[in-house]
Image (cartoon, rainbow, N blue to C red):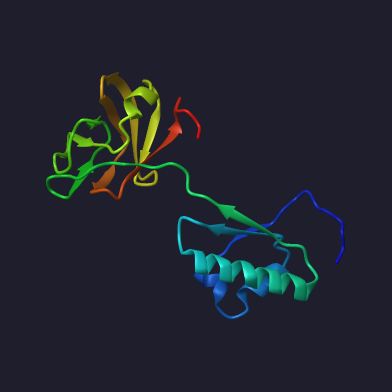
Amino acid sequence: MTRRLRRTKIVTTLGPATDRDNNLEKIIAAGANVVRLNFSHGNAEDHQARADKVREIAAKLGRHVAILGDLQGPKIRVSTFKEGKIFLNIGDKFLLDANLTKGEGDKEKVGIDYKGLPADVVPGDVLLLDDGRVQLKVLEVQGMKVFTEVTVGGPLSNNKASTNWAVASLPKP
């Protein structure tokens, strides 16, 4: 094996498609030198099997291939809605209320599981719900309530939507 290190890396994400046929071997032979395991999906056994396969193929081809484990960042889930699902339109005002309990959510408000959110955001912060499909801009914070305006609309359903921050003053884990 050559010991020359390159600064540029070719990264590929492993998953079910790379498990089929000789796809992984073809990818490594084509020059991929970092493989990414997305720990948000799959289980430990799947990831271990893929890592073992990478090591086997890399040795066979005489290549150095790094394995990158991509860990899921912090997520804050919205609570549940009376109707199970709502649709938010651009310009709608929407309240994230840390005091609301399950089943109290509607088109105007919903509870959140992270009670520290109101203390962590400031006006101007952008919150991403449902993996960025819905976006809210923080207008004001009062106690346990975060008042927002919808900047990117879409459907929002029970517990599935997670809140991440695009532009925020949140403490970093």
Residue lying at 72% horizontally and 53% vertically, measured from the top left: 9
Residue 47: % across, % down: 54, 65
- Note whether residue 15 is visible: no
Residue sitting farthest toward the bottom: 21
- Note whether residue 81 is visible: yes
In front of the other: 98 or 134:
98
Tell me the quarter of the picture where residue 127 sits.
Answer: top left
Q: Is residue 24 above or below residue 122?
A: below
Tell me the quarter of the picture where residue 138 sits.
Answer: top left
Q: Is residue 16 above or below residue 110?
A: below
Residue 110: % across, % down: 21, 37
Residue 160: % across, % down: 30, 50
In front of the other: 19 or 153:
19
Residue lying at 39% horizontally and 31% vertically, measured from the top left: 126
Residue lying at 27% horizontally and 35% vertically, measured from the top left: 90
Q: Does 138 sit left or right of 171 as displayed?
A: left
